[in-house]
Image (cartoon, rainbow, N blue to C red):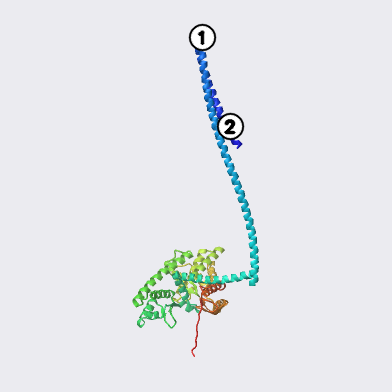
Amino acid sequence: MESILLALLGAALVGTGGLSAYLYKSLSDEKVKREKEINALKNIPEERQLELVGTKAKEILLSAERKALEIQAEMDKKSQTAREEIANLERRLITREEAVDKRTTLLEEREDKLEAKYQSLEQAKKDVQKIRTELATKLESIAQLTKDEAKDMLIKQVSEELKDDLARKIRQSEQELQSKSDELAKEILVQAMERSAVDYVAESTVTTFSIPNEDVKGRIIGKEGRNIRTFEKLTGVDVIIDESPETITLSCFDPVRRHVASLALEKLIQDGRIHPGKIEEVVQKTKEQIAKEIKKNGEKLAFDAGFPNLDPGLIKLLGRFKYRTSYGQGLDKHTMEVVNICGQIAGEIGANVQLAKKCALFHDVGKIMTHEQEGGHPEIGVQIAEKFHLEEEVKNAMLAHHHLADPICIESALVYIGDAISGARPGARFNNLEDYVKRIRALEDTAREYEGVKEVYAIHAGREVRVIVVPKVIDDNKITLLAHDIAKKIETTQTYAGTVKVTVIRETRGEGMAK
């Protein structure tokens, strides 16, 4: 506060100095004016000069007195104003100091109260902890369980409840997925229709087709067999309808014809109208569709292999690879696998990568014609290569990969290596009967490990596992969870091709006897 007062006094002194300067300037101006008047009096007689000087002196004294009074009054006014401002400032400062002191006092009181509350809370925490410890000891004594034992029991109980909730959630998710999976269901249906075959002929000449019900068989046969005769004539495929429930077998050595017949029959069953005219229309449209697919498949296979500008005739032959299998391995995928293997090896050893890939691309081209021409597929492949003027190295690779000729170049030998690697890869081709039986038994044994399982059957060549449970041990909510657990364990512990469906069956029977 003293610094503020000093500042105000300094300001007042500065104002006074300004006033003094103003007064000094006024007196200076008056002095100059008087000197001019004195000079003017020199030309006047002396007596007159004295008279005028006396008169003027009186006037000057009176004027100076008035100005002195005015200046004094003004100075008094400014001093009074400065004193009032200083007094106001002092009052405000005093008021602020009082407010600050009051607030400081309040804060100190609040701090004291908070400290007291904190001490009280700390003591309360200690008291609560002591009470909890005493209660826990009493509870353990009453329940005859330790804290860890009670915790384990609670966790087990919650786990059981969560299992039920999880089972319901899984069931809901499966229902939602089922409602949105029409397209996926079709793919799974086609996969489920495939049957494992022991011999090569059955696998390459027969397709098993599922139908919705037995009434469809009569509609497919038609009146006096007209529908089935028309279908067989137009497709070139034998339709075998026997006592097998909800199953029709299509038999033909040409895989493309079998595929056309299978798609056409599926369309006819979906449409519901099965008569000679409709059969002819559907078969013709299906043939056109398959022809486009063959061209598209051939172009894709050639492009993926790195030869997009092949002869259209070769493109058509490559497109038929998709419909040909060898020991259960798709010919198109097998070919691309050999192409990639040969290309990688050729690049590593410095051989001609493009030539190695071309030899690999056409090494099994004769397989798609084995049902139409005499001889093995290497010889038929050579005939096709001569027709389309392929390189000698390509012809040699067709023969050499089955030891029918000695390799004439390193690229031809690479085809033999790539073909052997692809065919021997685990899961690429069907295993023998002993391996098949072991795989089926392993699937059943995996499901039997769970509590409550009564019987287990692996059906559909190991593509489905049916588990029959004890109703008193497994309730409706737990069957979904059990199916999920078994499927996950099969997924992580077993080796299989495709997919394995796990179906858990819970059946309750009531029996009575009349005597």
Crowd around label 2: few <14 · some 14–19 · many ≥20 (10 Å): few
Q: Give the x, y percent position of residue 148.
A: 64, 69
Camera-side residue: 359 or 499? Answer: 499
User: Which residue sits at x=51%, y=12%?
Assistant: 51
Camera-side residue: 179 or 435? Answer: 179
Which image quarter: residue 209?
bottom left
Could you tell me if residue 232 is visible in this image?
A: yes
**In the image, is 42 to the left or to the right of 104?**
left
Q: On the image, numbered disc 1 is attached to which residue?
A: 47
Q: Is residue 81 above or below residue 112?
A: above
Please state the total of marks drawn on the protein image.
2
Report the Cα–Cα distance between label 1 and label 2: 53 Å
**In the image, is 285 to the left or to the right of 4?**
left
Q: Is residue 157 above or below residue 8?
A: below
Q: Residue furthest left?
A: 277
Camera-side residue: 173 or 509? Answer: 509
Q: On the image, numbered disc 2 is attached to which residue?
A: 10
Q: Residue furthest bottom?
A: 515
Considering the numbered disc 2 on the image, is that residue within a helix, a strand or a loop? helix
Q: Give the x, y percent position of residue 160.
A: 56, 72
Comes first in the chain, label 1 or label 2: 2
**Quarter that holds the N terminus:** top right
Considering the numbered disc 1 on the image, is that residue within a helix, a strand or a loop? helix
Q: Give the x, y percent position of residue 394.
A: 49, 68
Amino acid type, mark 2: Gly
Q: Is residue 45 above or below residue 82?
A: above
Q: Which label was assigned to residue 140? A: none
Q: Give the x, y percent position of residue 382.
A: 47, 71
Crowd around label 1: few <14 · some 14–19 · many ≥20 (10 Å): few
Amino acid type, mark 1: Glu
Q: Residues at badges 1 and 2 in contact (C-beta under 8 Å)?
A: no
Q: Nearer the viewer, mark 1 or mark 2?
A: 1
